[in-house]
Image (spheres, rainbow, N blue to C red):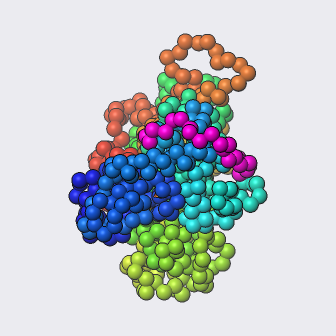
Amino acid sequence: MPKLIIDNIAVEVADGVTVLEAAQSVDIPIPHFCWHPALGKAGACRVCAVRMMEGPVKGIQMSCMLPAQDGMVVSTTDPEAVTMRRNVIEWLMINHPHDCPVCDEGGECQLQDYTIAGGHGIRRYDGKKRTHINQDLGPYIQHEMNRCIQCYRCVRFYQEYAGGTDFGVMGSAGRVYFGRFREGQLESPFSGNLVDICPTGVFTDKTARFRARYWDYDMAPSVCPGCSLGCNTTPVARYRELLKSIARRNEAVNSWFICDRGRFANGEVNDPQRPRTPLIDGVESSRNEALKALLFRIAQTEERYGTGSIAIVGSSRLSLEAALLLPTLAELTSSGALCYFASEEESGRTLPLFQLLTAGRSASQRDVRESDCIVVYGCDPLQDAPMLALAIRQAWRNGATVYTVGDGISLPCDVTTVDRLDAVPLSDAKNPVLIRSAADIPDQLATTLHQHDHLKLAVLFPAANSYGASKLALKHLGVSFEQAISSGDIKGVISVEADIPQKLLEGIPFVAALDWRMTETVQAAQIFFPTTAWVEMKGTFINHEGRVQRFNKVMNPGVPIRGLDPAVHPPHIHRTAPPGGEPQPAWQILAAVIEGLGGELITEPFTGEWERLRGLDAECEGVIINDI
Ligand code: FES
């Protein structure tokens, strides 16, 4: 544990920590471009200069390259170090465009920040700037090579961290070029991370270009709903339109990155066809009218078909807040079935694996990254949950052996293929992880888990809150909707963000739906309530490992301004609410229905044993829950 002094502050750090990291640990910022916590050092940019005053190393040094050692006395404010950093910025700006006011990266550009901080404003060198021809890298990533400062972050991420092979560094000396050998869409499913890690805007999000400035963004900490991993994101919105998503650091989950599927998934939120108005028999109505109609039809269904004729159906994508209210609604409607899964197939492949995730058994993405033996068994992480494939690659880079049971599984690392699970030498591994998608449990899996107490399990569930839905389904004796209707007694359905196929609704006279997507269930519903998407509300998901994570509201619901016909000016109507702003969080609509049915007014969905989740901070690592 080296002890050193940085700017008169005594610091003690672990072996191997660099001077730059040691300074960061006591909140002393040192400028850096090429160094990145997840990518390590490259020593390429020379902007992290500090002066070593005393100790084993003396003089101006690159703090990102220098391991902290006992007795070092470091100055980050020494005039020589400051001048060096200022000069480096000026050299970098010799070729970089001096166009911050009109640059689309302006406001979120590390080079801009350090250039201003270093005091460079007037270009003294009057030679011609070096220019490049940009490549078309596909629909998602914009290429602006003239902005490049050769920090090598992009290629280190793309090739080393993510295992991509279609992007690299070409040329030499002053003509170094980062791109593809030929123009074309980037092939890596993690290519969007180039946008986040490039410190100057060589790679920007093409889908959100020139739509807003950084200081205009509506942003909040959030969680990606694209799969069950619960990767942390910062969605960015403007004028009620979700513009883009940025990866948000959570070392226990996704570290610094997200996959392209989660990043470029704005379509459904912004969809002009998205249902945004309450409907009664296809006719637009107010929330109150729809609520009255729903209460009337619930009573009517019970009167006609008796108690137990209504099914309450939630889903694996429904927030925990709403999922928690479904049992109360089921009780008040004397429901015949409480369902958290639409189909028997989904329920059958989710619940048995959920039951194997006992305390200490479930593996996080960090557990996968730090594992020395990974077994991919009966699943395809690149398809089911791409970030887990990225985590597997990091383990492999650190020396782990990766086994796949059976052929046909593609991963961004070398693998050893075995025929059977028991052919993997799990006993020799220190912290093995087995990865499995939600599916039936073969005896072999149950036996293997039984035999190896130290084996952790990462289950790839189908949706963002599959874990929460499974937990509640088991607790409240829920059945799948498919099973519920097999008795023939179900004559009414209240579907809460559930994807019930049309064929399962045939012959059911009364269907009510709450949703923010246009689904088959919504189309079949006589009464409909629009709900908010995850970026339009505060809510909670439980990820695949049982980690409860909060997401905050990013933007208000409503028709995006760009969603209106661009040729027609929006109507000049004085409103107190935005057009299409009726959606509410599903739990709030459920609370109103519960109150209308004679239940207590619910203002806080986390009660009883769930109460401890009330104050959960969206910016923490989340809490593992397996005792409720
Ligand atoms: Fe140290 Fe680039 S951050 S050389």
Vertical placement of residue 469 versus 103, above or below:
below
Decide which of 412, 473 is in the foreground and name it: 412
Number of marks: 0
Classify the position of the N terminus by image quarter: bottom left
Taking 168 as reference, is 406 above or below it?
A: below
* Foreground of the two, 207 or 626: 207
Residue name at image x 37 percent, y 55 percent: 50
- Residue drawn at (64%, 15%), measured in percent from left and top? 571
Q: Position of residue 516 (x, y in %)?
A: 57, 38
Placement of the C terminus among the 4 image quadrants: bottom left
Where is residue 570 drawn, in percent x and y? 64, 18
Please tell me whether residue 367 is drawn above or below residue 504 in the rendered image: below
Residue at 40% across / 80% down in the picture? 430
Query: Residue 151: x and y, percent?
Result: 55, 56
Q: Quadrant of residue 474?
A: bottom left
Visible in this render: residue 482?
Answer: no
Q: Quadrant of residue 482?
A: bottom right
* Occupied quadrant, residue 70: bottom left
User: Residue 162: x and y, percent?
Assistant: 58, 64
- Asked whether 118 falls inside the magenta stretch, the response is yes
Q: Nearer the viewer, residue 463 or 265?
A: 265
Residue 56 seen in the current view: yes
In the image, 142: left or right of 394? right
Magenta stretch: includes residue 80: no
Specify the principal SS of the magenta part.
loop
Residue found 49% across the figure and 23% down from its top = 288
Magenta residues? 117-143
